[in-house]
Amino acid sequence: MTTTPALSVASPSGSFEAGPVELRALRDDDVRIDVKFAGICHSDIHQVREEWGTAIFPMVPGHEIAGVVAEVGDAVTRVKVGDHVGVGCMVDSCGECEFCKEGYEQHCVKGAVMTYNGTGYDGEKTKGGYAQGVVVSERFVLTIPEGLGLDVAAPLLCAGITTYSPLRRWGAAPGTKVAVIGMGGLGHMGVKIAAAMGAEVTVLSRTTDKADDSVKLGATKHLATKDGKVFEDLKGYFDIILNTVSADLPMEDYVGLLKARGVLVSVGLPPKKYEIAPGLLIGSSKVVAGSNIGGIPETQEMLDFCAKHDFGATVEVIGADEVDAAYDKVVDGKVRYRYVIDTSTISA
Ligand code: NAP
Ligand code: ZN
């Protein structure tokens, strides 16, 4: 057992405090990583603020982790000391069920172990990447390709894969029209990835504030949804709508924007139910779908895809003492487009 400086929070209304947390002694298949950067995902905020009702305190959040391998167990073969690596939302799964075998560890029938705010198969509570170190089984360690900076790579481990996976599954490609709802941490990655896949990309944002950025990231159009005009102008236009919004939306209006046989796939996780009249789906054989992060092989594929296309996330690097304020700014829509914590600023 060893310790590492980390940022933890003791209650939903608490502030982050720096202090040492324990890391498990290295098992044969474990990798100890010196964490350099950890992204702040809106899911961290939902979890810390107990908006999903499943918070375990004290909590060290962080599932967008990028760092350097510091130590490896005797049986580790895929990575070595000094390699640039990442860890996303999961740190274990049964490895034997049909989903694990197919590379969909997030759907493991035994239940994948989440990187933090979870309980490992050994009964220990998991701790995430707002820390200078993590210990993770090599099965869940991703290789960050050369050429991707660790700061801009960190958010790919959640925001990147969560948008890449549904865009790939539902066929974003040249000739398809993709809308991305919400230009935040996930949304801005959705724009970059869909554009790199060759799709025509439209951002549906509340306002036009981020219009210039959308176009720079690869979108053809950026439209404000505030006045509702877009729901008339673009009726029946899109093949794929990727909904990344963390709050409730008038879902029927968005279903109206789909072509016949089109798909509205949600990755945003507001706590309330959707309301969609079945007739709006049935008449034109539309699909409403969800998507949960992505499996480990697909996460590596996404990292390689981003490196090949020469982009990471668009980030603002912050220090440990800015995390509380950063949470409020994310909720207020002020981040451009992902806060990433420089973990060297966490004092022991
Ligand atoms: P984020 O950076 O806060 O972005 C969310 C975006 O949604 C905002 O930038 C904003 O875009 C829009 N938005 C926010 N409040 C809104 C409101 N009241 N009405 C309409 N639009 C609103 O959050 P994120 O980190 O991208 O995460 C987004 C959601 O995805 C969260 O619920 C998170 O838990 C979830 N998530 C899911 C998965 C998964 O596996 N499915 C993985 C990671 C995260 P505009 O300003 O452009 O309108
Ligand atoms: Zn996340």
Image (cartoon, rainbow, N blue to C red):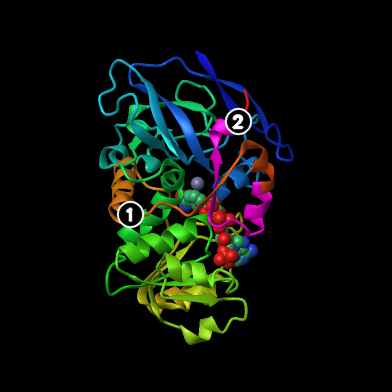
Q: Magenta span has 268?
A: no
- Identity, as a three-letter code, of the amino acid under mark 1: Asp
User: On the image, numbered disc 2 is attached to which residue?
Assistant: 346
- Residue 108 visible at all: yes
User: What is the magenta range?
Assistant: 326-346
304 or 235, which lies in front? 304
Q: Label 2 sits on what residue type? A: Ile
The residue indicated by pointer 1 is 310
> In the image, is the residue at mark 1 within 8 Å of ligand 1 by its beta carbon?
no
Could you say where residue 131 lies in the image, as x and y percent from the top left?
Answer: 55, 30
Q: Residue furthest bottom?
A: 233
Estimate the x, y position of residue 14 in percent, counting from the top left.
73, 37
Q: CA distance from mark 2 to mark 1?
A: 30 Å
Please tell me whether mark 1 sits on a helix, a strand or a loop.
loop
Label 2 near ligand 2 (CB < 8 Å) = no
Instruction: Estimate the x, y position of residue 254 in percent, counting from the top left.
Output: 50, 74
Residue 260 in the image: above or below residue 41: below
Instruction: Identify the mark at residue 46; answer none if there is no mark.
Output: none
Q: Badges 2 and 1: C-beta atoms under 8 Å apart?
A: no
Label 1 crowd (10 A; few <14 / some 14-19 / many >=20): few
Residue appearing at x 64%, y 31% in the figure:
8
Local packing at callout 2 (Cα closer than 10 Å; few below 14, some 14-19, many 20+) is many
Up-down relation of residue 126 to residue 178 (above or below): above
Asked whether residue 112 appears in the rendered view, the answer is no
